[in-house]
Image: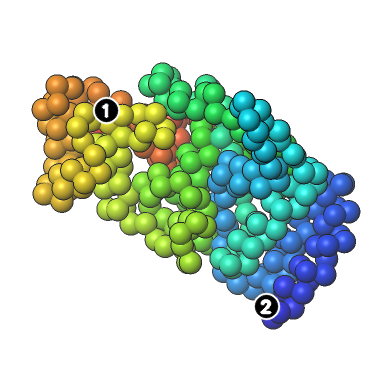
Amino acid sequence: MLQSLMRCITLQSTALIQSEVKSGTGGRLAMRCMNNYHMRQPMTTLLIDADILAYHVSAANQHTYKFGDDAVAVDVGDIETAFELADKKISELVHKLKAKDVIICLSCKTRDGFRRKILPTYKSNRTNVERPTQLQAVKDYLARVYTSKLWEGLEADDVMGILSTEPHKGKRIIVSEDKDMQTIEGWLYNPRNDTVAKYISMDHAHRFHMLQTLMGDAVDGYKGCKGIGKIKANRLLDNTPQKNWWRMVVNTYESAGMTEGDALVQARVARILRHVDRGTYPLWQPILWSSDESK
């Protein structure tokens, strides 16, 4: 059966995907093949971090040449090649994880996100970072061809977190390389590190949220508590009963000359939204995390 499935994809992908991409339907081809195979299997849906997927695809489709005196030339491949690579990566994920469907999860613009309103410096370190030329075009393609979700004020992480924890039938697997997704209870697959999907328990999710609150995240532009790195943060959590974690976090911040309010800002920025955080639909204003909701 698997050989037939792969033959279906291989034989059709070369000719049909190329023709269907031009008509805007190419991305569905591999999904139709997969659906035929998995129609009798338990429903598994992949929640794909399309920000990361689109970045990898668009980066792979260009080459940067650097010369003397800081001169740079960028050779960008055909956009349809990028689209086909995106389809290939998705069909590989569907096959590996035995999924029947995918939902493409995308971020709003950072300046419109709720975290920037809580902490103005959030991701401000990425403002002048050069991005692949075709990044937005690949995102637009994924949103157009596949089932996709992009909600005002939210990042792809939050979209995946909400969809993973809302009531649903079957199995949902978050597909992301972002370590922050460890703050969400449920199935997680990291294409960079994992060979199989793993289940993140509520205890692990809660601990990782407190870990991020303590040590911050330089990549995302929030600093955490002064003087606290990963080793010390883990030691503090190891030596404190779970029910007292938040009080320990506050005490640690206060010992560093900071306040409970500072700790709460960091915790709110670090928390990936869950179904219970949805707020007012359809505007998707998040219910900001507070310490009495620590579980």
**Which residue shows up at 71% across the image and 33% down it?**
73
The Cα–Cα distance between marks 1 and 2, rounded to whole angstroms, is 50 Å
Instruction: Please say whether residue 283 is visible from this viewpoint.
Output: no
Residue 67 appears anywhere in the view: yes
Quadrant for residue 5, please give it.
bottom right
- State the mark number for residue 264: 1
Residue 71 vs residue 153: left or right?
right
Q: Which residue is drawn at 80% across and 53% down?
A: 26
Judge by depth and name the residue closer to the eye, 286 or 131: 131
Disc 1 is placed on an element classified as helix
Of callouts 1 and 2, the N-terminal one:
2
Image coords of residue 195 (percent x, y) = 48, 66
Query: In the rendered view, would you say 194 is above or below 181?
Result: below
The residue closer to the viewer here, 3 or 38, is 3
Q: Is 258 situated left or right of 26 in this image?
A: left
Q: Which residue is drawn at 64% across and 35% down?
A: 66
Along the viewing direction, whichever of 263 and 172 lies nearer the viewer: 263
Could you tell me which quadrant the N terminus lies in?
bottom right
Residue 39: percent from left, percent from top:
67, 70
Disc 2 packing (10 Å; few <14; some 14–19; many ≥20): few
Q: Name the residue under label 2.
A: 2
User: Residue 125: x and y, percent?
Assistant: 45, 26
Question: What secondary structure is found at the residue carrying circle 2?
Answer: helix
* Left or right of residue 48, residue 139 in this image: right
